[in-house]
């Protein structure tokens, strides 16, 4: 098996202790199905070409330069050497600024995860940092230049090593207030809340990423295979329109209660009166069947 290639190598430093480390990609989209753009008439690949927005003439790579728009159609030109000179210098060191409780940072700030492992020497210091963070139940905030940008990194203990997640800057994370500003202040109580908790209780599980299937990738792979084999895939039936229902009725159906449930009688009212006859076994069985959730067809 080919050893993974490090994306970055440097040092991690806490206090006066440092050790060489390497960053490895933890998540990649390289295995996804990729398409090429073709000319429908010839079947040949189409190449991307940059053209002048005014003249329509092609612009060669050597004539392309970065620009920052200051007004509509007015740009400041930034030469390649100017951009390089503006990039912060990297000392290849992940310097830990602070240790914080693991649950203190909002995961909306998480960007990309990387595995952080010791690089050749200094494994004792690496294990010391890992185990110390585990015991204290903390994560580390560090900063360094990664891929030509100054980045803030959250470092956490992860199995035998560490996992380093680059963080979005505060200006990159949009406020949630705008997203939820039209949400009215509602308070749900009574039967609806009880039914919701019942449904949630029935659906409780544990996180297992291996059970998540990428249906889009699988469907496209099957389509490509069918094209190669010269066959067509069966057409899917349009989904049936759902029946209109109110929230309470939908909750009852989800909980397997069907029609509106009869209110439960208290022990006192159930035993009230001497002329009441005991329920027949058949009637009791029907009542139980009416409230038992229907089994889903396999």
Image: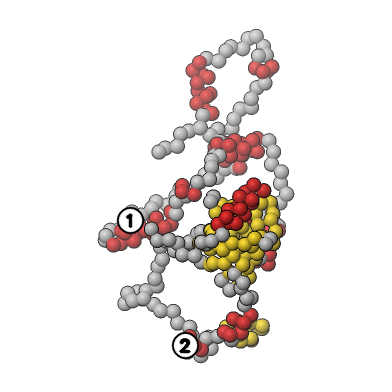
Q: Is residue 46 above or below residue 201?
A: below
Of 101 and 230, the residue lying toward us: 101
- Alpha carbon distance from label 1 to label 2: 44 Å
Q: Residue at x 46, y 47 (%)?
A: 211
Residue 244 visible in the displayed image: yes
At x 53%, y 19%, the residue is 284
Q: Residue at x 67, y 18 (%)?
A: 267
Q: Which residue is mark 1?
A: 233
Q: Quadrant of the C terminus?
A: top left
Q: Nearer the viewer, residue 132 or 230?
A: 132
Q: Earlier in the sequence, mark 1 or mark 2?
A: 2
Position of residue 32 relative to residue 279, above or below, is below
Mark 2, residue position? 60
Visible in this render: residue 108? no
Mark 1, residues whose alpha carbon is within 10 Å: few (<14), some, or many (≥20)? few
Q: Nearer the viewer, residue 204 or 81?
A: 81
Q: Quadrant of residue 74?
A: bottom right
């Amino acid at each position: 098996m080919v050893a993974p290639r490090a994306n970055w190598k440097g040092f991690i430093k806490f206090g006066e202790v440092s050790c060489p480390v390497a960053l490895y990609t933890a998540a990649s989209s390289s295995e996804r199905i990729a398409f090429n753009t073709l000319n429908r008439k010839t079947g040949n690949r189409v190449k991307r070409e940059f053209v002048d927005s005014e003249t329509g003439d092609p612009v060669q790579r050597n004539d392309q330069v970065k620009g920052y728009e200051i007004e509509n159609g007015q740009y400041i030109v930034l030469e390649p050497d100017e951009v390089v000179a503006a990039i912060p210098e990297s000392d290849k060191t992940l310097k830990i600024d602070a240790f914080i409780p693991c649950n203190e940072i909002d995961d909306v700030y998480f960007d990309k995860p990387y595995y952080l492992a010791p690089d050749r020497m200094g494994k004792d210091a690496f294990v010391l940092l890992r185990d110390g963070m585990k015991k204290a139940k903390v994560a580390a905030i560090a900063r360094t230049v990664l891929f030509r940008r100054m980045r803030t990194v959250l470092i956490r203990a992860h199995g035998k090593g560490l996992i380093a997640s680059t963080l979005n800057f505060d200006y990159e994370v949009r406020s949630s207030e705008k997203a939820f500003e039209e949400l009215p202040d509602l308070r749900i109580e009574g039967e609806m809340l009880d039914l919701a908790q019942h449904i949630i209780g029935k659906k409780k599980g544990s996180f297992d990423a291996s059970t998540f299937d990428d249906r889009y990738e699988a469907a496209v792979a099957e389509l490509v295979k069918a094209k190669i084999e010269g066959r067509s895939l069966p057409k899917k039936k349009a989904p049936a329109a759902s029946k209109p229902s109110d929230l309470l009725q939908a909750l009852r159906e989800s909980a397997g209660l069907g029609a509106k449930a009869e209110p439960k009688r208290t022990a006192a009212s159930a035993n009230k009166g001497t002329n009441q006859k005991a329920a027949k076994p058949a009637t009791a069985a029907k009542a139980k069947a009416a409230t038992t959730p229907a089994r889903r067809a396999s």
